[in-house]
Image (cartoon, grey):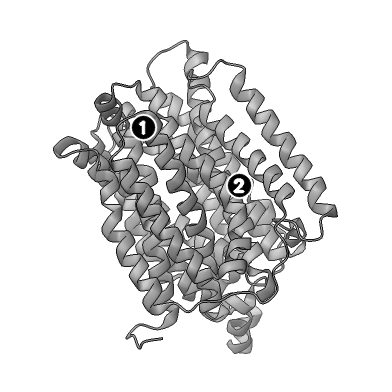
Protein backbone atom coordinates (compact mmCIF):
# COMPACT_ATOMS: atom_id res chain seq x y z
CA UNK A 1 0.00 0.00 0.00
CA UNK A 2 1.03 3.68 -0.32
CA UNK A 3 3.52 5.20 2.04
CA UNK A 4 2.18 7.13 4.97
CA UNK A 5 3.98 9.14 7.68
CA UNK A 6 2.03 7.32 10.38
CA UNK A 7 2.93 3.77 11.52
CA UNK A 8 0.27 1.11 10.86
CA UNK A 9 -0.27 0.67 14.60
CA UNK A 10 -1.58 4.26 14.62
CA UNK A 11 -3.03 4.67 11.12
CA UNK A 12 -5.25 1.56 11.03
CA UNK A 13 -6.98 2.14 14.41
CA UNK A 14 -7.58 5.79 13.49
CA UNK A 15 -9.21 4.73 10.21
CA UNK A 16 -11.39 2.17 11.98
CA UNK A 17 -12.15 4.71 14.73
CA UNK A 18 -13.45 7.08 12.04
CA UNK A 19 -16.27 4.64 11.24
CA UNK A 20 -16.89 3.75 14.88
CA UNK A 21 -17.12 7.42 15.83
CA UNK A 22 -19.73 7.98 13.13
CA UNK A 23 -21.79 5.02 14.35
CA UNK A 24 -21.56 5.91 18.06
CA UNK A 25 -22.24 9.61 17.51
CA UNK A 26 -25.31 8.85 15.41
CA UNK A 27 -26.71 6.52 18.07
CA UNK A 28 -26.52 9.18 20.79
CA UNK A 29 -27.41 12.29 18.79
CA UNK A 30 -30.77 10.90 17.69
CA UNK A 31 -31.98 10.55 21.28
CA UNK A 32 -31.72 14.33 21.74
CA UNK A 33 -33.52 14.99 18.46
CA UNK A 34 -36.49 12.64 18.96
CA UNK A 35 -38.94 15.30 20.25
CA UNK A 36 -38.21 17.56 17.26
CA UNK A 37 -38.49 14.67 14.80
CA UNK A 38 -41.77 13.57 16.36
CA UNK A 39 -43.18 17.10 16.17
CA UNK A 40 -42.31 17.47 12.48
CA UNK A 41 -43.97 14.10 11.72
CA UNK A 42 -46.95 14.73 14.03
CA UNK A 43 -46.09 11.59 16.01
CA UNK A 44 -45.92 10.77 19.72
CA UNK A 45 -42.22 10.90 20.83
CA UNK A 46 -42.72 7.58 22.66
CA UNK A 47 -43.80 5.94 19.43
CA UNK A 48 -40.85 7.42 17.59
CA UNK A 49 -38.53 5.71 20.06
CA UNK A 50 -39.01 2.79 17.65
CA UNK A 51 -36.36 4.56 15.55
CA UNK A 52 -33.85 3.77 18.28
CA UNK A 53 -35.18 0.30 19.05
CA UNK A 54 -35.27 -0.74 15.38
CA UNK A 55 -31.61 0.20 15.01
CA UNK A 56 -30.64 -1.84 18.07
CA UNK A 57 -32.68 -4.78 16.78
CA UNK A 58 -30.85 -4.66 13.47
CA UNK A 59 -27.51 -4.62 15.29
CA UNK A 60 -28.51 -7.60 17.42
CA UNK A 61 -29.58 -9.66 14.42
CA UNK A 62 -26.65 -8.96 12.11
CA UNK A 63 -23.62 -8.64 14.40
CA UNK A 64 -23.32 -12.44 14.85
CA UNK A 65 -23.18 -12.75 11.05
CA UNK A 66 -20.27 -10.31 10.67
CA UNK A 67 -17.42 -12.78 11.25
CA UNK A 68 -18.73 -15.24 8.66
CA UNK A 69 -19.22 -12.39 6.17
CA UNK A 70 -15.66 -11.13 6.69
CA UNK A 71 -14.18 -14.59 6.12
CA UNK A 72 -16.40 -15.21 3.10
CA UNK A 73 -16.02 -11.91 1.26
CA UNK A 74 -12.91 -10.31 2.80
CA UNK A 75 -12.66 -8.01 5.82
CA UNK A 76 -11.79 -4.84 3.90
CA UNK A 77 -14.57 -5.31 1.37
CA UNK A 78 -17.18 -5.94 4.07
CA UNK A 79 -15.95 -3.04 6.22
CA UNK A 80 -15.91 -0.63 3.30
CA UNK A 81 -19.39 -1.66 2.13
CA UNK A 82 -20.67 -1.43 5.72
CA UNK A 83 -19.62 2.23 5.81
CA UNK A 84 -21.45 2.79 2.51
CA UNK A 85 -24.63 1.07 3.79
CA UNK A 86 -24.52 3.10 6.99
CA UNK A 87 -24.22 6.38 5.06
CA UNK A 88 -27.04 5.43 2.67
CA UNK A 89 -29.20 4.55 5.68
CA UNK A 90 -28.35 7.95 7.20
CA UNK A 91 -29.49 9.70 4.03
CA UNK A 92 -32.68 7.63 4.14
CA UNK A 93 -33.30 8.84 7.71
CA UNK A 94 -32.68 12.46 6.69
CA UNK A 95 -35.33 12.37 3.94
CA UNK A 96 -37.91 10.33 5.91
CA UNK A 97 -41.40 11.80 5.98
CA UNK A 98 -43.11 9.25 8.25
CA UNK A 99 -42.35 6.98 11.18
CA UNK A 100 -42.50 3.94 8.88
CA UNK A 101 -39.86 5.38 6.58
CA UNK A 102 -37.68 6.36 9.53
CA UNK A 103 -37.84 2.88 11.09
CA UNK A 104 -37.03 1.21 7.75
CA UNK A 105 -34.07 3.52 7.18
CA UNK A 106 -32.79 2.94 10.71
CA UNK A 107 -32.92 -0.85 10.27
CA UNK A 108 -30.96 -0.53 7.02
CA UNK A 109 -28.51 1.75 8.82
CA UNK A 110 -28.23 -0.86 11.58
CA UNK A 111 -27.14 -3.46 9.02
CA UNK A 112 -24.18 -1.25 8.19
CA UNK A 113 -23.43 -0.56 11.85
CA UNK A 114 -23.54 -4.27 12.69
CA UNK A 115 -20.80 -4.95 10.15
CA UNK A 116 -18.71 -1.84 10.88
CA UNK A 117 -17.99 -2.49 14.55
CA UNK A 118 -16.76 -6.13 14.64
CA UNK A 119 -15.31 -6.20 11.12
CA UNK A 120 -13.52 -2.91 11.77
CA UNK A 121 -11.94 -4.47 14.84
CA UNK A 122 -11.04 -7.55 12.79
CA UNK A 123 -9.32 -5.32 10.22
CA UNK A 124 -7.29 -3.82 13.04
CA UNK A 125 -6.36 -7.19 14.56
CA UNK A 126 -5.16 -8.51 11.21
CA UNK A 127 -3.18 -5.35 10.44
CA UNK A 128 -1.41 -4.66 13.75
CA UNK A 129 1.17 -6.77 15.54
CA UNK A 130 -0.04 -8.04 18.92
CA UNK A 131 2.81 -6.20 20.63
CA UNK A 132 1.27 -2.93 19.37
CA UNK A 133 -2.29 -3.92 20.24
CA UNK A 134 -2.56 -1.93 23.48
CA UNK A 135 -1.63 1.31 21.71
CA UNK A 136 -3.97 0.49 18.83
CA UNK A 137 -6.88 -0.27 21.15
CA UNK A 138 -6.23 2.99 23.01
CA UNK A 139 -6.90 4.91 19.80
CA UNK A 140 -9.93 2.74 19.08
CA UNK A 141 -11.58 3.44 22.44
CA UNK A 142 -11.64 7.20 21.81
CA UNK A 143 -14.83 7.22 19.69
CA UNK A 144 -16.58 4.90 22.13
CA UNK A 145 -15.93 7.46 24.89
CA UNK A 146 -16.30 10.73 22.98
CA UNK A 147 -19.38 10.06 20.87
CA UNK A 148 -21.91 9.40 23.69
CA UNK A 149 -20.68 12.54 25.46
CA UNK A 150 -20.64 14.76 22.37
CA UNK A 151 -23.99 13.45 21.12
CA UNK A 152 -26.39 15.36 23.42
CA UNK A 153 -24.84 18.84 22.97
CA UNK A 154 -24.34 18.34 19.22
CA UNK A 155 -27.91 17.12 18.85
CA UNK A 156 -29.19 19.97 21.01
CA UNK A 157 -27.35 22.61 18.96
CA UNK A 158 -28.52 21.20 15.62
CA UNK A 159 -32.15 20.86 16.71
CA UNK A 160 -32.16 24.33 18.30
CA UNK A 161 -30.51 26.28 15.50
CA UNK A 162 -31.05 24.15 12.37
CA UNK A 163 -33.08 21.20 11.08
CA UNK A 164 -33.06 17.76 12.72
CA UNK A 165 -32.33 16.29 9.29
CA UNK A 166 -28.76 17.61 9.52
CA UNK A 167 -28.17 15.16 12.37
CA UNK A 168 -28.10 12.32 9.85
CA UNK A 169 -26.36 14.25 7.08
CA UNK A 170 -23.26 14.90 9.22
CA UNK A 171 -22.52 11.20 8.71
CA UNK A 172 -22.00 11.83 5.00
CA UNK A 173 -18.56 13.54 5.06
CA UNK A 174 -17.33 11.25 7.86
CA UNK A 175 -18.42 8.15 5.91
CA UNK A 176 -16.90 9.34 2.65
CA UNK A 177 -13.59 10.01 4.41
CA UNK A 178 -13.66 6.60 6.10
CA UNK A 179 -14.50 4.81 2.83
CA UNK A 180 -11.59 6.54 1.07
CA UNK A 181 -9.08 5.80 3.84
CA UNK A 182 -10.07 2.11 3.98
CA UNK A 183 -9.69 1.83 0.20
CA UNK A 184 -6.36 3.65 0.22
CA UNK A 185 -4.51 2.25 3.19
CA UNK A 186 -5.99 -1.08 4.35
CA UNK A 187 -5.13 -4.40 2.74
CA UNK A 188 -7.76 -7.07 2.21
CA UNK A 189 -7.73 -10.41 4.01
CA UNK A 190 -9.89 -13.41 3.25
CA UNK A 191 -9.95 -16.98 4.53
CA UNK A 192 -9.14 -19.71 2.00
CA UNK A 193 -11.65 -22.15 3.47
CA UNK A 194 -15.03 -20.98 4.66
CA UNK A 195 -17.53 -23.29 6.40
CA UNK A 196 -21.18 -23.08 5.32
CA UNK A 197 -23.41 -20.56 7.04
CA UNK A 198 -25.03 -21.88 10.21
CA UNK A 199 -28.46 -20.55 9.27
CA UNK A 200 -30.34 -22.26 12.10
CA UNK A 201 -27.83 -21.00 14.66
CA UNK A 202 -27.99 -17.47 13.28
CA UNK A 203 -31.79 -17.45 13.53
CA UNK A 204 -31.72 -18.71 17.13
CA UNK A 205 -28.96 -16.36 18.23
CA UNK A 206 -30.21 -13.31 16.33
CA UNK A 207 -33.76 -13.90 17.51
CA UNK A 208 -32.66 -14.35 21.11
CA UNK A 209 -30.54 -11.21 21.13
CA UNK A 210 -33.28 -9.20 19.42
CA UNK A 211 -35.79 -10.38 22.01
CA UNK A 212 -33.61 -9.36 24.94
CA UNK A 213 -32.68 -5.98 23.45
CA UNK A 214 -36.26 -5.18 22.44
CA UNK A 215 -37.59 -6.36 25.81
CA UNK A 216 -35.18 -4.23 27.83
CA UNK A 217 -35.78 -1.21 25.58
CA UNK A 218 -39.55 -1.34 26.20
CA UNK A 219 -39.68 -2.19 29.90
CA UNK A 220 -41.59 0.52 31.71
CA UNK A 221 -42.10 2.76 28.66
CA UNK A 222 -45.88 2.13 28.52
CA UNK A 223 -45.67 1.93 24.70
CA UNK A 224 -46.73 -1.73 24.77
CA UNK A 225 -49.09 -3.60 27.13
CA UNK A 226 -47.37 -4.41 30.44
CA UNK A 227 -47.05 -8.14 29.76
CA UNK A 228 -45.46 -7.82 26.30
CA UNK A 229 -41.93 -6.71 27.24
CA UNK A 230 -41.44 -9.44 29.90
CA UNK A 231 -42.83 -12.03 27.46
CA UNK A 232 -40.39 -10.93 24.76
CA UNK A 233 -37.53 -11.01 27.27
CA UNK A 234 -38.47 -14.56 28.25
CA UNK A 235 -38.70 -15.64 24.60
CA UNK A 236 -35.29 -14.11 23.89
CA UNK A 237 -33.74 -15.92 26.85
CA UNK A 238 -35.26 -19.21 25.70
CA UNK A 239 -33.88 -18.77 22.17
CA UNK A 240 -30.39 -18.07 23.56
CA UNK A 241 -30.60 -21.23 25.66
CA UNK A 242 -31.61 -23.18 22.56
CA UNK A 243 -28.68 -21.68 20.69
CA UNK A 244 -26.29 -22.83 23.44
CA UNK A 245 -27.57 -26.36 22.95
CA UNK A 246 -27.34 -26.01 19.17
CA UNK A 247 -23.74 -24.70 19.29
CA UNK A 248 -22.56 -27.75 21.24
CA UNK A 249 -23.55 -30.11 18.44
CA UNK A 250 -23.04 -27.90 15.37
CA UNK A 251 -19.71 -28.44 13.62
CA UNK A 252 -19.35 -24.80 12.55
CA UNK A 253 -21.70 -22.66 14.69
CA UNK A 254 -22.22 -19.01 13.83
CA UNK A 255 -20.53 -18.17 17.15
CA UNK A 256 -18.34 -20.78 18.84
CA UNK A 257 -19.00 -20.85 22.56
CA UNK A 258 -15.85 -22.96 22.93
CA UNK A 259 -13.86 -19.70 22.64
CA UNK A 260 -14.82 -19.13 26.27
CA UNK A 261 -12.34 -21.87 27.19
CA UNK A 262 -9.57 -19.32 26.45
CA UNK A 263 -9.03 -17.66 29.82
CA UNK A 264 -8.20 -14.14 28.65
CA UNK A 265 -11.10 -14.11 26.18
CA UNK A 266 -13.52 -15.47 28.81
CA UNK A 267 -12.51 -12.79 31.32
CA UNK A 268 -12.87 -10.10 28.66
CA UNK A 269 -16.38 -11.26 27.70
CA UNK A 270 -17.76 -12.00 31.18
CA UNK A 271 -15.96 -9.37 33.23
CA UNK A 272 -16.03 -6.84 30.42
CA UNK A 273 -19.79 -7.29 29.94
CA UNK A 274 -20.56 -6.79 33.64
CA UNK A 275 -18.40 -3.68 33.69
CA UNK A 276 -19.96 -2.40 30.45
CA UNK A 277 -23.47 -2.68 31.92
CA UNK A 278 -22.53 0.09 34.34
CA UNK A 279 -21.09 2.23 31.56
CA UNK A 280 -24.20 1.71 29.41
CA UNK A 281 -26.31 2.94 32.30
CA UNK A 282 -23.95 5.90 32.89
CA UNK A 283 -24.54 7.09 29.32
CA UNK A 284 -28.21 7.81 30.10
CA UNK A 285 -28.13 8.40 33.87
CA UNK A 286 -25.54 11.19 33.93
CA UNK A 287 -27.13 13.43 31.23
CA UNK A 288 -30.58 12.82 32.77
CA UNK A 289 -29.34 13.70 36.25
CA UNK A 290 -27.67 16.90 35.06
CA UNK A 291 -30.68 18.00 33.00
CA UNK A 292 -33.68 16.73 34.99
CA UNK A 293 -32.14 16.67 38.45
CA UNK A 294 -29.88 19.75 38.26
CA UNK A 295 -31.93 21.78 35.76
CA UNK A 296 -29.11 22.22 33.22
CA UNK A 297 -29.64 22.52 29.47
CA UNK A 298 -28.50 19.82 27.06
CA UNK A 299 -25.58 22.00 25.98
CA UNK A 300 -24.50 22.72 29.58
CA UNK A 301 -24.82 19.05 30.48
CA UNK A 302 -22.74 18.06 27.48
CA UNK A 303 -20.00 20.53 28.32
CA UNK A 304 -19.68 19.01 31.80
CA UNK A 305 -19.78 15.37 30.72
CA UNK A 306 -17.29 16.14 27.94
CA UNK A 307 -14.64 16.02 30.69
CA UNK A 308 -14.93 12.22 30.56
CA UNK A 309 -13.91 12.23 26.91
CA UNK A 310 -10.93 14.48 27.64
CA UNK A 311 -9.83 12.05 30.34
CA UNK A 312 -10.14 9.20 27.86
CA UNK A 313 -7.97 11.07 25.37
CA UNK A 314 -5.30 11.62 27.99
CA UNK A 315 -5.27 7.91 28.79
CA UNK A 316 -4.15 6.86 25.31
CA UNK A 317 -0.75 8.45 25.86
CA UNK A 318 -0.14 6.31 28.96
CA UNK A 319 -1.91 3.00 28.23
CA UNK A 320 1.10 1.15 26.83
CA UNK A 321 3.38 2.14 29.70
CA UNK A 322 0.78 1.25 32.33
CA UNK A 323 -0.02 -2.19 30.90
CA UNK A 324 3.66 -2.99 30.41
CA UNK A 325 4.53 -2.06 33.98
CA UNK A 326 1.54 -3.50 35.84
CA UNK A 327 0.14 -6.17 33.48
CA UNK A 328 -3.50 -6.73 32.60
CA UNK A 329 -4.51 -8.63 35.71
CA UNK A 330 -3.28 -6.15 38.30
CA UNK A 331 -4.62 -3.17 36.35
CA UNK A 332 -8.04 -4.71 35.81
CA UNK A 333 -8.45 -5.92 39.40
CA UNK A 334 -7.54 -2.56 40.95
CA UNK A 335 -9.18 -0.39 38.30
CA UNK A 336 -12.46 -2.32 38.53
CA UNK A 337 -12.70 -1.49 42.22
CA UNK A 338 -11.89 2.17 41.61
CA UNK A 339 -14.22 2.58 38.61
CA UNK A 340 -17.10 0.73 40.26
CA UNK A 341 -16.79 2.87 43.38
CA UNK A 342 -16.59 6.02 41.24
CA UNK A 343 -19.79 4.99 39.46
CA UNK A 344 -21.55 4.72 42.82
CA UNK A 345 -20.17 8.13 43.81
CA UNK A 346 -21.72 9.67 40.69
CA UNK A 347 -25.03 9.34 42.51
CA UNK A 348 -23.67 11.53 45.32
CA UNK A 349 -23.20 14.57 43.05
CA UNK A 350 -25.59 17.40 43.91
CA UNK A 351 -26.62 20.66 42.17
CA UNK A 352 -24.95 22.86 44.81
CA UNK A 353 -21.52 21.32 44.20
CA UNK A 354 -18.98 23.42 42.23
CA UNK A 355 -18.94 22.58 38.53
CA UNK A 356 -15.13 22.48 38.69
CA UNK A 357 -15.39 19.58 41.16
CA UNK A 358 -17.82 17.69 38.88
CA UNK A 359 -15.63 18.26 35.82
CA UNK A 360 -12.50 17.08 37.65
CA UNK A 361 -14.30 14.01 38.94
CA UNK A 362 -15.63 13.11 35.47
CA UNK A 363 -12.20 13.73 33.93
CA UNK A 364 -10.55 11.22 36.29
CA UNK A 365 -13.31 8.63 35.89
CA UNK A 366 -13.18 9.04 32.09
CA UNK A 367 -9.45 8.34 32.17
CA UNK A 368 -9.92 5.20 34.27
CA UNK A 369 -12.87 3.86 32.23
CA UNK A 370 -10.90 4.34 29.03
CA UNK A 371 -7.98 2.43 30.55
CA UNK A 372 -10.34 -0.38 31.56
CA UNK A 373 -11.78 -0.73 28.05
CA UNK A 374 -8.34 -0.60 26.45
CA UNK A 375 -7.14 -3.44 28.69
CA UNK A 376 -10.31 -5.53 28.26
CA UNK A 377 -10.40 -5.13 24.47
CA UNK A 378 -6.69 -5.79 23.93
CA UNK A 379 -6.52 -8.74 26.33
CA UNK A 380 -9.51 -10.42 24.64
CA UNK A 381 -7.46 -11.35 21.58
CA UNK A 382 -4.12 -12.00 23.25
CA UNK A 383 -4.44 -15.80 23.11
CA UNK A 384 -6.82 -16.16 20.14
CA UNK A 385 -5.42 -17.98 17.11
CA UNK A 386 -5.41 -16.13 13.79
CA UNK A 387 -7.97 -18.58 12.35
CA UNK A 388 -10.41 -17.74 15.17
CA UNK A 389 -10.10 -13.94 14.98
CA UNK A 390 -13.27 -13.39 12.95
CA UNK A 391 -15.28 -15.56 15.33
CA UNK A 392 -13.78 -13.80 18.35
CA UNK A 393 -14.53 -10.30 17.06
CA UNK A 394 -18.16 -11.24 16.34
CA UNK A 395 -18.51 -12.86 19.76
CA UNK A 396 -16.95 -9.89 21.53
CA UNK A 397 -19.06 -7.33 19.64
CA UNK A 398 -22.24 -9.31 20.33
CA UNK A 399 -21.47 -9.39 24.07
CA UNK A 400 -20.65 -5.68 24.10
CA UNK A 401 -23.86 -4.67 22.35
CA UNK A 402 -25.95 -6.85 24.64
CA UNK A 403 -24.25 -5.48 27.77
CA UNK A 404 -24.77 -1.85 26.75
CA UNK A 405 -28.44 -2.47 25.96
CA UNK A 406 -28.95 -4.26 29.27
CA UNK A 407 -27.18 -1.41 31.07
CA UNK A 408 -29.48 1.20 29.55
CA UNK A 409 -32.50 -0.94 30.43
CA UNK A 410 -31.41 -1.52 34.03
CA UNK A 411 -30.66 2.16 34.56
CA UNK A 412 -34.09 3.17 33.31
CA UNK A 413 -35.87 0.46 35.29
CA UNK A 414 -34.20 1.38 38.58
CA UNK A 415 -35.30 5.00 38.07
CA UNK A 416 -38.87 3.84 37.38
CA UNK A 417 -38.84 1.56 40.43
CA UNK A 418 -37.51 4.33 42.66
CA UNK A 419 -40.25 6.68 41.45
CA UNK A 420 -42.91 4.05 42.10
CA UNK A 421 -41.63 3.34 45.63
CA UNK A 422 -41.72 7.04 46.45
CA UNK A 423 -45.11 7.45 44.80
CA UNK A 424 -43.71 10.44 42.92
CA UNK A 425 -43.99 11.69 39.35
CA UNK A 426 -40.79 13.73 39.03
CA UNK A 427 -37.23 12.43 39.31
CA UNK A 428 -35.12 13.68 42.20
CA UNK A 429 -31.49 13.26 43.25
CA UNK A 430 -32.32 10.27 45.45
CA UNK A 431 -33.59 8.32 42.41
CA UNK A 432 -30.26 8.77 40.63
CA UNK A 433 -28.37 7.90 43.82
CA UNK A 434 -30.14 4.53 43.93
CA UNK A 435 -29.68 3.93 40.19
CA UNK A 436 -25.94 4.65 40.31
CA UNK A 437 -25.61 2.41 43.38
CA UNK A 438 -27.22 -0.54 41.57
CA UNK A 439 -25.25 -0.25 38.33
CA UNK A 440 -22.06 0.50 40.26
CA UNK A 441 -22.44 -2.76 42.21
CA UNK A 442 -22.97 -4.63 38.92
CA UNK A 443 -19.75 -3.16 37.54
CA UNK A 444 -17.92 -4.06 40.74
CA UNK A 445 -19.02 -7.70 40.33
CA UNK A 446 -16.72 -7.96 37.28
CA UNK A 447 -13.81 -7.98 39.76
CA UNK A 448 -14.17 -11.73 40.27
CA UNK A 449 -13.65 -12.49 36.54
CA UNK A 450 -10.44 -10.45 36.45
CA UNK A 451 -9.24 -11.80 39.80
CA UNK A 452 -9.14 -15.33 38.33
CA UNK A 453 -6.65 -14.35 35.61
CA UNK A 454 -3.06 -15.56 35.77
CA UNK A 455 -0.54 -12.89 36.87
CA UNK A 456 0.99 -12.82 33.37
CA UNK A 457 -2.32 -13.06 31.46
CA UNK A 458 -1.99 -11.53 28.00
CA UNK A 459 1.70 -10.77 28.54
CA UNK A 460 2.42 -11.23 24.82
CA UNK A 461 0.23 -8.15 24.27
CA UNK A 462 0.93 -6.07 27.41
CA UNK A 463 4.67 -6.85 27.48
CA UNK A 464 4.41 -7.22 31.26
CA UNK A 465 6.49 -10.39 31.47
CA UNK A 466 9.28 -8.63 29.55
CA UNK A 467 9.07 -5.66 31.91
CA UNK A 468 9.58 -7.92 34.92
CA UNK A 469 12.47 -9.72 33.23
CA UNK A 470 14.25 -6.41 32.55
CA UNK A 471 13.97 -5.14 36.12
CA UNK A 472 17.01 -5.34 38.42
CA UNK A 473 16.86 -8.18 41.01
CA UNK A 474 16.23 -5.84 43.93
CA UNK A 475 13.22 -4.27 42.17
CA UNK A 476 11.80 -7.67 41.25
CA UNK A 477 11.93 -8.83 44.87
CA UNK A 478 10.01 -5.75 45.97
CA UNK A 479 7.05 -6.89 43.87
Q: What secondary structure is found at the residue carrying circle 1?
A: helix
Which residue position is annotated with label 1? 289
Q: Quadrant of residue 41?
A: top left
Q: What secondary structure is found at the residue carrying circle 2?
A: helix
**Residue lying at 45% horizontally and 59% vertically, measured from the top left:** 82
Q: Residue 393 location in percent, x, y?
A: 60, 62
Is 429 drawn above or below residue 368 in the view shown? above
Which quadrant of the figure contains the N terminus? Answer: bottom left
Q: Left or right? Give the position of 451 relative to 290.
A: right
Q: Residue 384 location in percent, x, y?
A: 68, 71
Does residue 380 appear in the picture of this structure?
Answer: yes
Is 314 drawn above or below residue 448 in the view shown? below
Q: Which tag, 2 or 1, sits closer to the chain's start?
A: 2
Total marks placed: 2
Q: Left or right? Give the position of 241 relative to 267.
A: right
Q: Residue 417 location in percent, x, y?
A: 53, 20
Amino acid sequence: MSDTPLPRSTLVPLIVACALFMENLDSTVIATALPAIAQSMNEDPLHLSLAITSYLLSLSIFIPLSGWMADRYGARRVFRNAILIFVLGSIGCAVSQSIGQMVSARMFQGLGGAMMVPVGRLVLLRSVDKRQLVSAMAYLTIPALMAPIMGPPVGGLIVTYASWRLIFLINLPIGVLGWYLVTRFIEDTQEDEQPPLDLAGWMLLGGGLAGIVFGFENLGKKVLPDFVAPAILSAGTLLLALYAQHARHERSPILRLSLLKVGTFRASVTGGSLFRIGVGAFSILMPMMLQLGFGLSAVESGLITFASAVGGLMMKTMAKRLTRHFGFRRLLVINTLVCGTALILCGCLRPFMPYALMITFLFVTGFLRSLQFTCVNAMAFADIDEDDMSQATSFSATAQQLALSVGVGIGAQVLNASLALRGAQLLQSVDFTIAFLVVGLISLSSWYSFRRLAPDAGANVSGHRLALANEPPSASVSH
